[in-house]
Amino acid sequence: MSALPFLDRDHTIAPPGYSRWLVPPAALAIHLCIGQAYALSVFNLPLSRLLGIKESLPGDWGLTTTVWIFNIAFVFLGLSAAVFGKWLERVGPRKAMFASACCFAGGFLIAAIGIYLHIIWFLYLGYGVLGGIGLGLGYISPVSTLIKWFPDRPGMATGMAIMGFGGGAMIGSPLADNLMKFYATPTSVGVWETFLTMGAIYFVFMMFGVFTVRVPAEGWKPEGYTPPVKNDNAMITTASVTADEAIKTPQFYFLWVVLFLNVTAGIGILAQASPLIQETFLLKGITAPTAEQTKNAAAAAAGFVGLLSFFNLIGRFFWSSLSDKIGRKPTYMIYLGLGCALYALIPSLANAGNLALFVGTFCLILTMYGGGFATIPAYLRDMFGTMQVGAIHGRLLTAWSAAAIAGPTIVTYLRDYQINSGIPKAQAYSTAIYVMAGLLVIGFISNLMIKPVDSKHYYKDETAPVAPPEPETARVQQGATA
């Protein structure tokens, strides 16, 4: 007997007549909160002035130090998703969501102590490790459930949930900026107080998702739904592959490379979005900005981060829904091919001083970056079936862990190298952005290599008796709302 029986899977099975459209809000409640991780760049510059308050002192942390909070959090997102994927399939989404809320909020608390004491390892262990585990559990917890609720529209279903993660910074960025202004004093930049407050707020909202999520009853299907016939061109299987067998297929690793490179390109920019826009445009040519200029630039940069988050959110729903129509493979060809061209264009826009096109190009890129995340669960479902798609998705997210180190590290260290070589800050990001464009070319080739999974990997339950075909009238549970 569980100590908290209301968290058990048996207590989350939907009753007859339950509307599946009540499940996406529960998923959004989790993803909008943990998506705050994309707004961490808002804290980068304030964290570099904890001692100096108005400007950095020799004992303050630099960007190459604080960027590891972001890196570690996303490493543990992928690792925890991989480790706990099969556990999630067994215990259900409610228990996983509750664990996510405890870890994510607890990470804020420990990080706040670290900021107050000025001990960077508390931030690494708090928001990075514990918070990262919360990110991983929260990220995968609703995905498998939504695919089971929406077998007729898996791309749209996962897009509805995962768009929340992309939109988290749209809330988290201005919230953090306003809280830091509220708590700021002549002796504090207001960061540790902001971390405490945000941790409490997010825990409360995540509890809404915990208590409202439901799983479909065994054998449930949407009214009028007919399972698809195998289509080699669309690469949609009617069989299933277990998580352990999936990692033996070349398709899994091609998809791993596709996700890794698409994420590396996008996450490297997101991790430094706030300083990037400030140094490239807002504070360009200003060697010693006044307090007012710094304050205004920070507020405008927070708006830029929020805007990127908005388009990240829109892209997750738009592109994943479109993939239901045109197929997953063609959709990723768009992400990687068009994304490469847009990245290559950005340095020219920056040099020309065209802020509107610069921002607009990044917004379009972020729709495809977000779309890549939202479409990958449906891609996995097409390739490996629904039986253990949540666990397979968790294992594939190790690509995100690797990208979380590669992307921000490439951008941050190339930026510092360029500046130390005498390149102006406004041009210091160009080399890193060209590198990202090159990575997307490799991802494009990897996506082209993907073909249907060989039938030798399909799951075969040899101990189960062969059941007679179901009568047509018994295939749909009446009363279920489509």
Image (cartoon, rainbow, N blue to C red):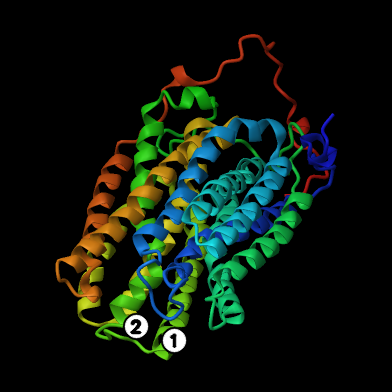
Image position of 91 (left or right of 276): right
Image position of 374 (left or right of 212): left
Q: Which amino acid does label 1 sit on?
A: Asn
The residue at the point 26 percent across, 69 percent down is 346
Name the spot of residue 400 as percent of width and height, x first. Answer: 43, 46
Up the image or down, 440 lies above or below 115; here it is above
Residue most extreme to the left: 421
Q: Which mark is residue 352?
A: none
The residue at the point 61 percent across, 61 percent down is 32
Instruction: Report if residue 338 is visible in the image.
Output: no
Q: Name the residue under label 1.
A: 296
Name the spot of residue 181 as percent of width and height, x first. Answer: 56, 81
Q: Quadrant for residue 358, please give it.
A: bottom left
The residue at the point 49 percent across, 35 percent down is 395
Given residues 386 and 285, the one toward you in this image is 285
For the residues bearing labels 1 and 2, Cβ distance under 8 angstroms: yes
Up the image or down, 15 lies above or below 277; here it is above
Mark 2 closeness class: few <14, some 14–19, many ≥20 residues within 10 Å: many
Image position of 321 (left or right of 361): right
Name the spot of residue 195 as percent of width and height, x first. Answer: 60, 65
Q: What element carries label 2?
A: helix
Given residues 429 and 143, the one toward you in this image is 429
Name the spot of residue 191 as percent of width and height, x first. Answer: 55, 70
Q: Give whichever of discs 1 and 2 has the lower sequence position.
A: 2
**Rendered-image quadrant of the N terminus:** top right
Q: Quadrant for residue 21, please give it.
A: bottom right
Q: Name the residue under label 2.
A: 282
Q: Is mark 1 on a helix, strand or loop?
A: helix
Instruction: Report if residue 461 is visible in the image.
Output: yes
Mark 1 closeness class: few <14, some 14–19, many ≥20 residues within 10 Å: some
Q: How many labels does the image show?
A: 2
Q: What residue type is labelled 2?
A: Leu
